[in-house]
Amino acid sequence: MNFKELMKSEAASGVLLVLAAVLALLAANSPASGLYGGLLDVPVEVRVGNLEIAKPLLLWINDGLMAIFFLLIGLEVKREVLIGRLSKPSQAALPIAAAIGGMLVPALCYVFINWGDADALAGWAVPAATDIAFALGVLALLGDRVPPSLKIFLLALAILDDLGAIVIIAIFYSGDVSVTSLALASGAMVFLIVLNRSRVLRIVPYALIGLAMWVFVLKSGVHATLAGVALAFAIPLRAGGAPGSSPLERLEHSLHPWVTYGIMPVFAFANAGVSLSGFTANKLLEPVTLGVILGLVVGKQVGVFGFSWLAVKTGLARLPQGATWLHVYGVSMLCGIGFTMSLFIGSLAFEHLPRTDFLIANRIGILVGSLIAALGGYAVLRAASGRRPDVAK
């Protein structure tokens, strides 16, 4: 998939995500709310001998389908690091700096607002995430008004942000670990590495062992979606062949439309349904909601733009070709669109707590903060389209 095709698909994905979120909100605030909740609570069970996996439909979506989403993210990260936009230090310096700031400052904003409440602090990583599909979708609406290098910068930044989110989930949002299941998962990973080192290029063996590894990780207490990332890192990327011919690139190309047009909208529909019964403007000032909004809207701007400015001024990086500081500021605002990844981290942080109001407040904060970031970023980048690039000094 070339860059133009990617931008078109991300724009379409952004529209689908909006529609899915709107449908979820309508369903949760209509006479069909009982049907909506009942659908997500439908028990789904798979049994093979003594091995049983029984979960409500919502958790099959969040633990199963999202593992495929993370598989795609892992494939993108590996390709970019080995042969793509993150393979050279000169190319990677600016997005790395921006991604670090874009995760650190929003988390600090949230912690500052919620300091003293241990349960609320569980959501500290929610505003640290960026929704790559939404952010690129908004940027795609501007077409040729923004330089191509800016789109590449945002894509690399968002991929690094996703990688950071994966690390956060692995370290901070895993439950009690089963040593036996984790050992079996590690054994499956060893098999995958052996396949890679043996130059096995067919996808099927990797998929079968990857499925077994997902089951082991699910039973281990580590979040099951991380199995998708581990599988991605084992898929071979062989240089020297025709572009797009390696197993990794073929799998990435095959998965992209399924994830973009299927899994992500389904996830949005299942997780964005928030009952607004009794909602008032004061709800936006509740600590969890306010922390998420400030993290996404203020923290992302300060973190992404501030760390980018420091990287350029210290000589570690350069501005994207043809871009101005106003362009970079607009991108920093777009990074405040958390949505898919923020909803996912929020579910991990709050779904097991007895206080359901935290989960609802978190979702409201994500929806409001992401909307403000999208509109603000679009307005700034549109205003920047007629300006000439500044010379970075």
Image (cartoon, rainbow, N blue to C red):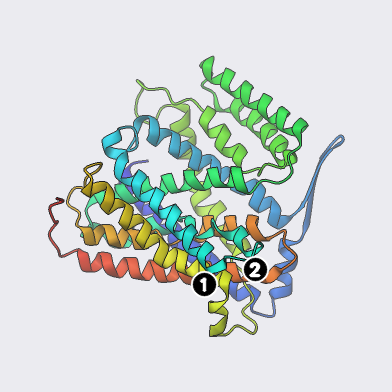
Residue 136 tag number = none
Residue lying at the far front in this picture: please name it: 116
Query: Upstream in the sequence, badge 1 or badge 2?
Result: 1
Residue 224: x %, y % from top left? 66, 42
Determine whether the residue tagged by mark 2 lies in a helix, strand or loop.
helix
Q: From the viewer's side, name the closer residue of 8 and 289.
A: 289
Determine whether the residue tagged by mark 1 lies in a helix, strand or loop.
helix
Q: Report the quarter where the N terminus lies.
A: top left
Is residue 374 shown to the viewer in this render? yes
Q: From the viewer's side, name the closer residue of 197 and 279.
A: 279
Q: From the viewer's side, name the closer residue of 12 and 361.
A: 361
Residue 177: x %, y % from top left? 73, 39
Q: Quadrant of residue 198?
A: top right
Residue under the image location 45 percent in, 64 percent down: 296
- Residue marked by disc 1: 290
Residue 66: x %, y % from top left? 59, 48
Q: Quadrant of residue 386?
A: bottom left
Q: From the viewer's side, name the closer residue of 334 and 262.
A: 334
Total marks placed: 2
